[in-house]
Amino acid sequence: MKNITLALLSMSVLIASCSKQPVANFTTDKDTYTAGESIVCSNTSEDAVVYDWEYLSASSGQTITEQIIGDHDSIKIETTNAYGDGEFEIKLTVTNEKRDNTDEVTKTVNIIAATGSVTFYTKTQTHVDEIEVTINGEIKTLTKQFEETADCNEDGAVYFEDLAVGVLQYSVYHKIIKVTKTYDILILKDNCQRIEVLY
């Protein structure tokens, strides 16, 4: 009986001294995001007290490690067009209470660049077919003079679509007077701007 009691006591001590193996896991609120949206990661890990999140910083291009101790809640990752279109990896490494076991999981979401568009038109210029507008190396020529503001993508105007949100440069070249003027434009998400070409 004494031997059985000692064996049971030894097993109890052994079980108590064993550390739990943590299990890393999290979910994201979506699989695909448009740049500018927040990725919400909900931590569903088990038997862990230290959570190390790793993801890419859009502003610096460096990997950020965000450590949370004793907190099992969500984190938010801000996205921008600096990510471009493509896959985005998020890694979570978890550590148990005794700090002697870890586990990790990596998940991938898709980022879609936020875009907008712009239409260029003229109400005052003659020889409209001599006016070229260039954005991102793409050259387009006006073909019509308008009496009123042109609609987005109206025939005769110049239309550029799927432009990355943010500040872009565009240039206007007049073939007759051989002058190029360069301007900045702020592209807005899901917005079609209309700009009158003036000389």
Image: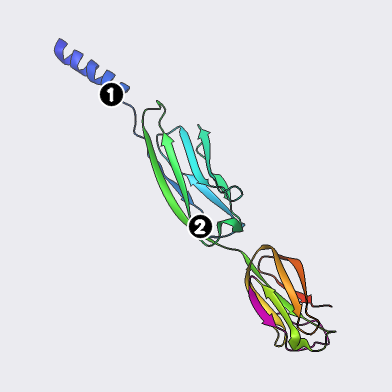
Taking the spot 80% from the left edge, 87% from the top edge, the residue there is 146
Q: Which residues are magenta?
A: 136-152
Name the side, left or right, on which 19 lies relative to 194.
left
What is the CA distance from the residue labelled 1 to the residue labelled 2?
Answer: 40 Å
What residue is pinned by disc 2? 30
Q: Quadrant of the N terminus?
A: top left
Q: Residues within 10 Å of mark 2 (few under 14, many from 20)?
A: few
Q: Nearer the viewer, residue 102 or 16?
A: 102
Taking the spot 46% from the left edge, 33% from the top edge, the residue there is 50
Q: Residue furthest top?
A: 2
Does any portion of residue 1 appear in the rendered image?
no
Taking the spot 42% from the left edge, 48% from the top edge, the residue there is 106
Residue 143 place in picture, x, y as percent: 73, 88
Between disc 1 and disc 2, the foreground one is 2
What residue is pinned by disc 1? 15
Does any portion of residue 20 appear in the rendered image?
yes
Q: Quadrant of the C terminus?
A: bottom right
Name the main secondary structure of what is drawn in magenta.
loop
Residue flagged by tag 2: what amino acid is it?
Lys
Secondary structure, mark 1, is: helix
Secondary structure, mark 2, is: loop
In the image, residue 181 sits, relative to residue 31, either above or below, namely below
Residue 29 place in picture, x, y as percent: 51, 54
